[in-house]
Amino acid sequence: MPSKSGNLSLRDGDGFVVTPSALPYAGMTEADLVRVGPEGAVAPGARHRPSSEWRLHAAIYAARSEAKAVVHTHSPRATALACTRRGIPPFHYMVLAAGGPVRCAEHATFGTQELAENCVAALDGRRAVLLANHGVVTIGATLAAAVTLAMEVENLAGQYLDLLAAGLKPVLLNDRELEEAAAQFAGYGRAV
């Protein structure tokens, strides 16, 4: 697993707290996290620079008031699929965990405002997106929810790639089938 690629953040007032740039996760502590204002100003006393993707996090928080956490990974299977510039079609109902089929955002250089804008556009109506030739981004009401969704996207990407590698063409769920699954999803995971 990569030791320092990817990043995560939590909304904090009008800004957010994000992982630092290029610091290996294994040795990271809470004191290493960086508080960033909505326009990118780093809070005084920070020990590190914020992640190079701070613009991506800022843009998501500005566009999506319900997002309280953002997770960006370079997980192997989702990243491999993103390198084909394909999203994840509705071959399995679990795409609904992301709000529907997972789109692949247009390519832009990492750390740029263009990438942030492409990500936000592809996230419209969704909670997960692949970044072309880069990785995956998920959002959630909690950090645990965003991490769980990132793992689900990785699983879906792996299943989809396995089908493609086997030379099989997956049968995609149609709109009616997705609507029926979404109705079932409405109560999924809730206590009685």
Image (cartoon, rainbow, N blue to C red):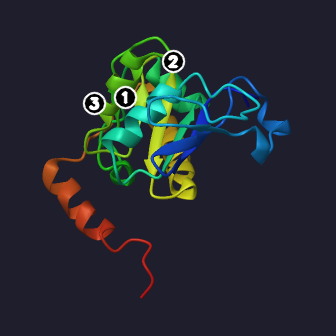
Residue 49: give x, y in percent of width and height. Answer: 67, 25
172 w.r.t. 103: above or below:
below
Labelled pair 3, 1 in contact (Cβ < 8 Å) = yes
Q: Position of residue 1 (x, y in %)?
A: 73, 31
The residue at the far right in this view is: 27
The three-letter code of the residue at mark 2 reads Gly
State the residue at coordinates (20%, 63%). Answer: 180
Badge 2 crowding class, 10 Å Cα cut-off, few under 14, some 14 to 19, many 20 or more, is some
**Residue at 46%, 11% in the rendered image:** 109
The vertical placement of 184 against 100, above or below, is: below
CA distance for labels 3 and 2: 16 Å
Q: Secondary structure at mark 2?
A: loop
Of helix, strand and loop, which one carries label 1?
Answer: helix
**Residue 111, disc:** 2
On screen, residue 67 above or below 24: below
Q: Secondary structure at mark 3?
A: helix
| Residue located farthest toward the bottom when viewing the structure as drawn | 192
Quarter of image, res 185: bottom left
Badge 1 density bin: few <14, some 14–19, many ≥20, Cα 10 Å: many
* Left or right, residue 111 beside residue 87: right
Between marks 3 and 2 in the image, the one whose residue lies nearer the viewer: 2
